[in-house]
Image (tube, rainbow, N blue to C red):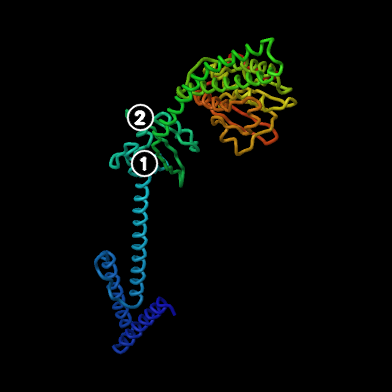
Amino acid sequence: MQPATQAWGFAAVRLLGTAVTGFGAGWLFGNPFGGLAAALALHLAWVLANLARLEWWLRHRSYADPPDIGGVWGEIIAQIVRLHRRKRFHKQRFVQLMRQLQRSTAALPNGVVILNAQREIVWFNRMAARLLSLRRTADLGMRIENLLREPEFVRYLARQDFSNPVIIRPMTGEDCYLSLQVAPYGDGQLLLLVSDVSRQMRLEAVRRDFVANASHELRSPLTVISGYLETLGQDPALDPDLHAPLAEMRRQAERMTAIIRDLLELSRLEETGEIVGGEPIDVVALLALLRKDTLARPVHPRDVRVRVDSDARLIGDEPEIHSAFSNLVDNAAKFTPAEGSLEMRWWVDEDGGHFAVSDTGMGIPPEHIPRLTERFYRVDAGRSRATGGSGLGLAIVKHVLQRHGATLEVRSTLGGGSTFTCHFPPERIKAQLQPLTSATA
């Protein structure tokens, strides 16, 4: 039998014994029910006294010993003592875990900021305080946007797309760059990770300067080499056996010139990464020109179509937009067989303007798609060299779109072709007076 059951059985026996004793005593004095009432009253007084002792001990249990009461009251007190010990154990364990968490986050090389669903600061570690100039007494409970007023970070929070970090340069007067990335968790809470990437950014700037300077220095010798090769190729006294080597040398010189030209263009775009304004661009005329250039290639897809669903104009820098669209069309034409097809499409909806290039080429394996816009990245290096690709076209496209507040979407089916789509925000679209019905060339 359990101790609690025994205690309740003893309490029941005690109550019954008290009632029988009182009833018997009252019967001896001629009033049995009076005796019973007196006995029950005494038992109630004893219960109330024990309850008062229990209440006093609960209020002073931090320093007072529990009362020594047997029976049910003793069992209740024992249960309370066990619960109190368990609570104290879990409290101590929680405090230890919190101290370990604070020590571990303090040792992290990155800053950590915990935000609630309203983006208010709940907690931050020492590195976050140093990198973001946060003060524990004044900034807890403040909205993070009120403390970090960098436009890029505010747009990053508004987009709700936290797959990639955002780089900001705090207005501290120092050559400092911070990488901020948000990780959602819990019920709308956010974890903000802060890293100092100043060294990486300085190395990147050195690399860009080196590429730009080297490209400038190589352009002049290549021009001279190309000129001499062209002159030698036109010499009637040239040995016929040298025509093929000279033609290959000219082709490689032209390829190197194209790479240098793309490197210089990419360096220029990276150096001036701010959002550009621009003038309205006639996209319909631009697509017609791109189709004409594609058909003028020595080898091109058999079917080259232009589908225009809107005559709305795109506000931007026309040379940059032409370069981005041309790179997309050029890539599609290079990797589409002669019997395949290529389509350029322009349309506008409530989300903005969209330009898509679809082809029926070999397609791209899914694991390569996230890296397509990296410098010199090639899915098939052998075929890219055969087609004369520099590996910089999609990197240029990415930077042009970033400067216009746009994004690039890639969809591809291995063996079934690819579609590259540029999405421009609504503020980049200027509608014409007369709507245009869908047209295909």
Q: Closer to the camera, 253 or 432?
A: 253
Seen as rendered, the residue at the extreme bottom is: 28
Residue position for label 2: 175
The mark found on residue 364 in the picture is none
Which quadrant of the figure has residue 27? bottom left
- Which class describes the residues within 10 Å of circle 2: few (<14), some (14-19), or many (20+)? few
Check whether the beta carbons of the residues at disc 1 and disc 2 lie within 8 A of each other: no
| Amino acid type at mark 2 | Asp
Q: Earlier in the sequence, mark 1 or mark 2?
A: 1
Q: Is residue 333 left or right of residue 320?
A: right
Discs 1/2, front: 2
Measured as percent of width and height from the top left, residue 252 is found at 61, 22
Rendered residue at 50%/16% (across/down): 278
| Amino acid type at mark 1 | Ile
Seen as rendered, the residue at the extreme right is: 339
Rendered residue at 66%/21% (across/down): 248
Residue position for label 1: 121
| Image height of 184 relative to 175, above or below | below
Rendered residue at 30%/87% (across/down): 25
Which quadrant of the figure has residue 255? top right
Q: Closer to the camera, 265 or 315?
A: 265
Real-space Cα distance between discs 1 and 2?
26 Å
Q: Secondary structure at mark 1?
A: strand
Quadrant where the image shows the C terminus: top right
Q: Closer to the camera, 290 or 386?
A: 386
Measured as percent of width and height from the top left, residue 316 is found at 52, 18
Seen as rendered, the residue at the extreme top is: 236
